[in-house]
Image (cartoon, rainbow, N blue to C red):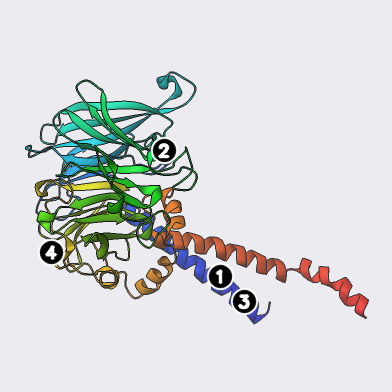
Amino acid sequence: MTRRRLAGRLLAVAVLLLAAGTLVTGFAASSDGGAGQVTGTGQQVAPPTDGTTVVATDSNTWLGRDGEGPRASAELFAVAPNGTVTYYNDTHTRYWDVDPVEGEAATVEYVYADHLTPEACGGESVCTRNGVERVNLETGEVTSVYSRVTPGKHSTRWHDVDRLDEDHLVVADIGRDRVYVVNTTTGLVTWSWDARSEYDVAESGGPYPEDWTHLNDVEVLDDGRIMVSLRNHDQVVFLERETGLQEEWTLGSDGNHSRLYEQHNPDYIPEAQGGPAVIVADSENNRLVEYQREEGRWTESWAWSDRQLQWPRDGDRLPNGHTLVTDSNGNRVVEVNDAGKVTWSMDVAFPYEAERLETGDESTGGPSAQRADLGEQTNASAGGASEPGSGGSDGGPLEPARNAIAGLFDGPTANAVMYVLPAWMSRIHLAALVTIVVTLVVWSAAEAYWSAWTVDLHRPVELERQ
């Protein structure tokens, strides 16, 4: 055995031990109270904060609560200002949008989805019940508001419904690429807008008809317009119910990923709060971003990310200028202050949306970044430390190296892979897993090359030369 071979083997062992240690440490941390399910027993799950935080989580497509794998089940829960769970529900397959009910201190409406068996669907294929329920977080009383059954279970689940008035809801009908208004008393659809009336199915968006627009968010504005997120078109659009699409107001364009990249949950900040502005979870770009409307154009006015942020899907501007961020693949909900520092953090397995009840619906009570003078925070926060008590951690002297490796695993491919991995795995753990696989492949190839079989394979050539 030559020194070179020995050195190579020792290096491979060291790399494998380091990578395996990273995975074991991450798994152990999750078992001891890291990212995972909230149990609903009333124990403290987060540091104290100024208000009640309601979180809806999305279990995974095939690693979900329906027995298909190890990812945590979907949950809807409320955390009191002292950090304890005061309401908990995990009866549905998915939880999506959550909105406070106007005039009610402790009541919310939420969107859910339930996967149904072919037998329950009355046919040979699975289907999904999409619906809206209202719950009083203090009494636990749940009231059904509206529901419909859609075929399939992946690209037909509603992600958002917004209330228009006492009797009407605006539905983001993801399966049929449309927005519609329904009277919840009569069940009649009173208005609808179909994305096919404005966009070419062959030259835009995702695959048609399987998942063309992925229309994942609607928001009724104070002036009566409806803001809509077309995720697979990388666009946020504005609709007038009488005239349709306001093309000059469109934020983003199909395929322009420097602007928006398959976004979620855009929130409109009205002129009274320093807008018009829109704060968006720019999911595939792993950042929160805000655009200000100036002289008929959208101008980027703020952005934020940190080392852990991975596929965020919601960001709400709070009245104090802070931003409540839902970090889906980062398995946490965090509050970021006006300096870009994380001041509060809660570990949550695969959250979809979070609401701070006392601050109004979404970002309507918060100032625009321009009014709050937030400025660009992406670079500063990416290298900054968390505030004391925020849930952040000091990774020690190896943290810069681990962060550099994890930084290689950004973008849609990593997000898609992490979507099907256990909830405790972060980019660092994904990097460790890939490192183990690559090291084993390279080591195996080296051993094969060094083996006696390789020497014997070349020996006839050597004899022939003699």
Q: Amino acid at mark 4?
A: Arg
Taking 354 as reference, is 372 above or below it? below
Residue 228 placement, left or right of 136: right
Classify the position of the N terminus by image quarter.
Answer: bottom right
Kindly identify the residue that appears in the image at 39 percent across and 49 percent down.
Answer: 233
Which residue lies under the disc numbered 1?
A: 12
Circle 1 crowding by C-alpha within 10 Å: few under 14, some 14–19, many from 20:
some
Separation of residues labelled 2 and 4 (CA atoms): 38 Å
First in sequence: mark 3 or mark 4?
3
Which label number is shown at residue 155?
2
Q: Secondary structure at mark 2?
A: loop
1 or 2: mark nearer the eye: 2
Question: What percent of the width, then of the height, locates residue 124?
Answer: 49, 22
Separation of residues labelled 1 and 4 (CA atoms): 54 Å
First in sequence: mark 3 or mark 1?
3
Q: Secondary structure at mark 1?
A: helix
Front residue (pair 261, 123): 261
Circle 3 crowding by C-alpha within 10 Å: few under 14, some 14–19, many from 20:
few
Separation of residues labelled 3 and 2 (CA atoms): 53 Å
Circle 2 crowding by C-alpha within 10 Å: few under 14, some 14–19, many from 20:
some
First in sequence: mark 3 or mark 2?
3
Residue 342 placement, left or right of 139: right
2 or 4: mark nearer the eye: 4
Taking 70 as reference, is 340 above or below it? below
Q: Amino acid at mark 1?
A: Ala
Separation of residues labelled 3 and 4 (CA atoms): 63 Å
Which residue lies under the disc numbered 4?
A: 371
Q: Secondary structure at mark 4?
A: helix
Which residue lies under the disc numbered 3?
A: 6
